[in-house]
Structures are given as C-alpha cells and as structure tokens.
Image (tube, rainbow, N blue to C red):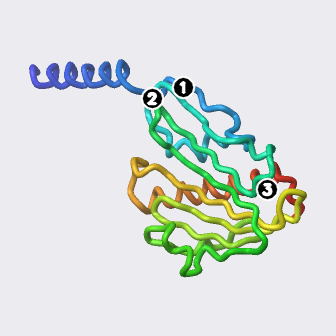
Amino acid sequence: MSRAIASLVGCGLVLSLTACGGGREYAVPQEACGVALNEKTLDPFLVDGKEFKVVGDPLTESNGKNSWSCSISVDDGLVVDFRVDSVDKIYDPMDESESFRFTHRAKMEDLPFSGLGALGDRTAMVSTNCAGPKADYLVTEIRLSTKAGGDDTERRKHIEAFTVDFVPKVKKVLGCTA
C-alpha cells in the first residue's frame, strides 16, 4: 500500500514539475517574412520557451534582391531557417554540386507541384518553376536546428511535410504563375 501511495505522490510531483517549468509560453504568428505558417507542420520543430522571434525581410520586399532569407527562433535558439533564391534555371538538388547542403540526401518523390526536391536529415531543397514578376525559377532551402529532436526518419518526414506545405506559399507570395 505504501508503495502505491509513494508512486502516486511521485507521479504527482513529476506532473507538477512539468507544469511549472518549461512549456511554450509564446504564440506562433500566422506568418514569417510574409509567408503564411502552418502551425501543424511547424509544430514538430518548436521547442519550449518564452519568445518566438522571426528575423528576415518579407518576400514581398524585393529591394533589387534575388534572394531572401528568414530565420525562426525560440529564445534565441534557431528553430528553422529558410532561404529563397530567384534563379535563371531549375537546379537539381540531387546534383553532386548540391551535396554539401545535406546529410544522407535522398530525392523527394511525388512532389505535389512541378519541381525537383531533395531531403536530408536536417535540410530540404526544392527547385521549381515560377514564371512570375520576381522570378523565372525558385530555389527554396529549408534548414533545421541541430537541436531538432526525434529520430532521423521521423524528423525527415516532418521536414518534408513542412516543405511541401511551404513552397507553394512562397510561390504564391512571389506571384508565380507556374
């Protein structure tokens, strides 16, 4: 009987410590750098903390630039970083010249939009048509913090889900017609 009571008290203590410390004390904004965020696909990468911060220029501001970058952090710890480049052709992320970006690179199959994609343990890269006022083609690279948890298979699945959701939103913001 005393073991059962000790167990219940121990569980209560663990629950109260969990509730008192840590947790997400921030709200996830609806967009980052002018691109809508899907909290569901971003959630696997979010960590406990107090402050959610976005640093970067909105994709809607060109300022003569051909590339945009944006970082999302929690309490000054990087969560996800993305870069979008306006380019003159489709670049194959599986080309040997792109291998430096990845650990355990694999081709992304069956993208729900035209383009080429590759996925690594902490990185995704997609090259796609745009035919818009700001770009003929786009390369979107998404990098996650080395602190992003989970096993590689699960994390890769989450990176791919985020990327497949995110790239069409980037294309829409940049006015792509293809």
From the viewer's side, name the closer residue of 71 and 31. 71
User: Of the residues under marks 3 and 2, which one precedes in the sequence?
Assistant: 2
Marks 2,1: beta carbons within 8 A: yes
From the viewer's side, name the closer residue of 57 and 170. 57
Residue that mark 2 sits on: 49
Distance between the alpha carbons at the discs numbered 3 and 2: 31 Å
Residue under the point 11% across and 21% down: 1
Residue 60 rendering spot, x and y as whole percentages: 80, 44
Q: Residues within 10 Å of mark 1 (few under 14, many from 20)?
A: some
User: Of the residues under marks 1 and 3, which one precedes in the sequence?
Assistant: 1
Amino acid on which the number 1 mark rests in the picture: Tyr
Residue 153 rendering spot, x and y as whole percentages: 44, 62
Residue that mark 1 sits on: 26
Distance between the alpha carbons at the discs numbered 1 and 3: 28 Å
Residue under the point 88% across and 65% down: 131
Residue 32 rendering spot, x and y as whole percentages: 67, 39
Q: Which label sits on residue 138?
A: none
Q: Residues within 10 Å of mark 3 (few under 14, many from 20)?
A: many
Report helix, strand or loop for mark 2: loop
> Looking at the image, is 14 positioned above or below residue 178?
above
User: Of the residues under marks 2 and 1, which one precedes in the sequence?
Assistant: 1
Amino acid on which the number 3 mark rests in the picture: Lys
Distance between the alpha carbons at the discs numbered 2 and 1: 7 Å
Horizontally, residue 128 falls left or right of residue 79, namely: right
Report helix, strand or loop for mark 3: helix
Residue that mark 3 sits on: 171
Residue 152 rendering spot, x and y as whole percentages: 41, 61
Identify the image quadrant of residue 48. top left
Q: Residues within 10 Å of mark 2 (few under 14, many from 20)?
A: some
Amino acid on which the number 2 mark rests in the picture: Gly
Residue that sits furthest to the bottom in the current view: 96
